């Protein structure tokens, strides 16, 4: 079968740094039931921990009823829509009960239920800081992170929750949602298959499992899932619309139409009418299609799908002015509707307005996930405008994309059994299985660039660098003049710290597309990671004025200035970044590292404590505080902070490295070995030479522990330099 892994090629051009009851929610915590569930959750939490002492909670028995009454008022204000008043009251209550885990947890759940995600996260992080590794706290914190679109943090929290309860279908489902949003369909499918086995009648899980399958073109496999879901919940419109779509994409048009008719009865919304109209539009029955699109617009005059499809019909019937009007309306309500941009570009080409057509097509290829035809049209328009270099560049992209297999629905593949079998393999065996399937696919289709990219990635995962470089060389032969693929390969190589190879690919991409800010950013970042700070600054300065306003660019620029010794400039950049993004822990740590390089330990500590007050659950900030504590001679506090950082950042090799070095320097060799074993058992990716570290620990002489004593000044400075080096290489 065609592995779903084969469908998950990373989008070329993504930067090394980030630049950036119903099917969409967990069961429970809704409407009138929220208070009851909050109280039940708090009771469950309390049952897992020892009863807090009066000093731990900061509450007297006399004050407890008043706290409960104030929590009830917060709930009532949230339910009545008095959001500002409720959030303010919650903050005051939180501040007055700063050591009471149940108050923070209950407030967090209430705020989450009211979609007040930032204050909810803060309260749940406070609860997590007071009572680490509590399943309920971690699960709700993960949901709050997910609803805030902070998928990285959500992934960390939910994975930690699953270590406590691996068989929780709701948590598996929530993490599946996170992976789906992160464009990790294989990981999402693996979790959702597990969740479905544990809770086969959970229709939220059924829907998401089917939806992920559909995005990978496994429509036939989604059909029996959706049919089973509708037997459980026949009134769920999302299940029925997905089933109709799957029928349609599998060529079962009449069954799709019957399903959409039922959908309109269940949910007579603009979206339901749009599905029916689209079915008739694809059949070439425009009059019937128009009837349904018009009915949809009566339900919602702003529905972009109905507006676009009405425009499509008008354009095909020669009514260009009306078509253009409808396309503009569709884009007003959905600016990223790429098909509308393409149709407008077609109208501009017909009317010989080529400059406008080119601009529309450039927007289209950025937004559409299958942009090959857009690049071809753009190249033709650019050639007509005598933009020969640009035309050749975009034609090269088209030629690369057109070599890949055309996307389309697969026949029934028994996908769920395949995913279940694959998920039971070890990580190494999964990578080997993927490699075997890729090798077989390439033997059949040796000229498909996408498969060669995936082959290089599979070899890199297995640590087979010569084979990975050979796959990259084959890919370069097929698409050396395609800036998009060259950029994507550069990002892949940089992810595995092959910076020389990455720089070469970014330079090739920049030669083909010299105006790309993304490529300039990636090239500057690769130089920075390699330690070539002057070259990094030179390339960063080539980014356009607009591109230099990007937060990720400014963070990189701050790091570059810090390593070039311009602490004042770097500090200014990071302080401005904190003002703009006060909940980004990386900026606090970056500013603190600048201050530590300048020898101002007190200022670094103040910066990190400021960040911790805002983001109590930040592993990065706690890691930084561990470094500061070492420098201040507070060795026991340093151990607490560094241990907690490992708990919060289990995927970051730098957290293990710093803790292991700390234990080594304090004579705790057994603990250092235990940290190494934790690293070996984690999913952390890094360039740690485990064998050499094990050898060094075996040879380390036994000496008395100095955990309760300040480190000597020389040892503190050595530890600082090692920590700074770790930050440069792994953050």
Image (tube, helix red, strand yellow):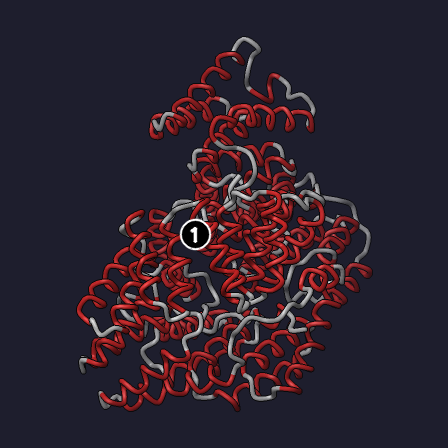
Q: Is residue 595 above or below residue 433?
A: above
Identify the residue at horizontal 51%, vertical 39% (top origin).
Answer: 616
Compared across the picture, whether 275 is left or right of 162 comes to: left
Give 327 or 721, whichever is nearer the viewer.
327
Q: Position of residue 262 (x, y in %)?
A: 48, 50
Compared across the picture, whether 67 is left or right of 566 comes to: right
Compared across the picture, whether 275 is left or right of 498 comes to: left
Compared across the picture, whether 423 is left or right of 298 comes to: right
Give 382 or 671, whichever is nearer the viewer.
382
Identify the residue at horizontal 20%, vertical 72% (top origin).
Answer: 320
Q: Position of residue 566 (x, y in %)?
A: 37, 62
Can residue 100 be seen?
no
**Residue identified by numbered label 1:** 587
Please identify the quarter of the rendering in which residue 565 is found.
bottom left
| Secondary structure type for disc 1 | helix
Q: Is residue 152 above or below residue 402?
A: above
Q: Is residue 475 above or below residue 654?
A: below
- Quarter of the image containing the N terminus? bottom right
């Amino acid at each position: 079968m065609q592995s779903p892994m084969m469908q998950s090629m990373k989008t070329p051009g993504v930067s090394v740094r980030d630049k950036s009851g119903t099917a969409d929610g967990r069961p429970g915590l809704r409407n009138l039931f929220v208070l009851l569930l909050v109280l039940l959750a708090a009771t469950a939490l309390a049952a897992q921990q020892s009863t807090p002492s009066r000093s731990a909670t900061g509450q007297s028995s006399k004050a407890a009823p008043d706290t409960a009454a104030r929590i009830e008022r917060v709930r009532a204000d949230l339910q009545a829509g008095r959001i500002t008043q409720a959030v303010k009251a919650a903050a005051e209550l939180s501040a007055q009960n700063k050591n009471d885990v149940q108050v923070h947890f209950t407030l967090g759940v209430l705020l989450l239920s009211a979609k007040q995600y930032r204050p909810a996260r803060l309260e749940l992080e406070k609860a997590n800081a007071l009572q680490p590794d509590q399943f309920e706290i971690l699960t709700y914190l993960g949901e709050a992170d997910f609803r805030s679109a902070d998928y990285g943090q959500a992934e960390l929290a939910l994975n930690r929750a699953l270590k406590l309860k691996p068989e929780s279908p709701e948590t598996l489902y929530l993490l599946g949602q996170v992976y789906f949003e992160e464009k990790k369909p294989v990981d999402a499918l693996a979790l959702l298959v597990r969740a479905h086995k544990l809770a086969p009648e959970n229709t939220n899980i059924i829907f998401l499992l089917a939806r992920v399958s559909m995005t990978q073109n496994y429509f036939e496999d989604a059909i029996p899932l959706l049919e089973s879901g509708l037997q459980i919940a026949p009134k769920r419109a999302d299940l029925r619309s997905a089933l109709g779509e799957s029928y349609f994409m599998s060529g079962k048009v009449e069954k799709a139409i019957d399903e959409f008719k039922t959908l309109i009865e269940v949910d007579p919304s603009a979206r339901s009418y749009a599905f029916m109209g689209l079915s008739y539009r694809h059949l070439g029955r425009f009059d019937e299609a128009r009837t349904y699109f018009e009915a949809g617009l009566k339900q919602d005059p702003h529905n972009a799908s109905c507006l676009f499809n009405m425009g499509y019909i008008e354009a095909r019937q020669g009514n260009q002015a009306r078509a253009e009007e409808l396309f503009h309306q569709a884009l007003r309500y959905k600016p990223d509707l790429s098909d509308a941009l393409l149709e407008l570009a077609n109208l501009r080409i017909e009317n010989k307005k080529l400059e406008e057509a080119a601009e529309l097509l450039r927007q289209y290829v950025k937004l559409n996930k299958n942009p090959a035809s857009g690049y071809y049209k753009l190249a033709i328009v650019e050639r007509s405008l005598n933009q020969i270099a640009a035309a050749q560049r975009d034609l090269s992209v088209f030629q690369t994309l057109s070599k890949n297999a055309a996307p389309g629905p697969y026949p029934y593949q028994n996908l769920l059994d395949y995913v279940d079998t694959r998920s039971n393999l070890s990580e190494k065996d999964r990578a080997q299985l993927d490699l075997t399937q890729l090798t077989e696919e390439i033997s059949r289709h040796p000229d498909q660039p996408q498969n060669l990219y995936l082959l290089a990635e599979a070899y890199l995962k297995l640590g087979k660098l010569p084979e990975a470089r050979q796959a990259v060389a084959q890919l370069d032969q097929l698409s050396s003049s395609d800036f998009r693929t060259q950029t994507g390969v550069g990002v892949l190589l940089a992810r595995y710290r092959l910076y020389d190879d990455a720089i070469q690919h970014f330079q090739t991409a920049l030669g083909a597309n010299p105006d790309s800010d993304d490529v300039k950013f990636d090239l500057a970042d690769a130089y920075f990671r390699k330690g070539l700070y002057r070259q990094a600054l030179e390339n960063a300065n080539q980014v356009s004025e607009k591109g230099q306003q990007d937060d990720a660019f400014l963070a990189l620029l701050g790091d570059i200035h810090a390593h070039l010794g311009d602490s004042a400039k770097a500090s200014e950049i990071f302080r401005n970044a904190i003002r703009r993004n006060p909940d980004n822990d990386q900026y606090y740590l970056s500013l603190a590292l600048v201050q530590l390089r300048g020898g101002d330990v007190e200022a670094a500590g103040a910066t990190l404590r400021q960040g911790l007050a805002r983001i109590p659950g930040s592993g990065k900030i706690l890691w930084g505080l561990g470094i500061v504590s070492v420098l201040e001679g507070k060795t026991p506090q340093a151990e607490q902070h560094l241990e907690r950082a490992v708990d919060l950042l289990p995927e970051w090799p730098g957290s293990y490295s710093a803790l292991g070095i700390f234990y080594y320097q304090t004579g705790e060799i057994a603990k250092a070995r235990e940290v190494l074993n934790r690293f070996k058992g984690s999913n952390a990716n890094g360039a740690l030479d485990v064998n050499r570290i094990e050898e060094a620990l075996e040879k380390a002489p036994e000496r008395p522990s100095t955990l309760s004593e300040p480190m000597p000044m020389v040892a503190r400075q050595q530890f600082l330099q090692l920590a700074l080096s770790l930050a440069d290489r792994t953050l």
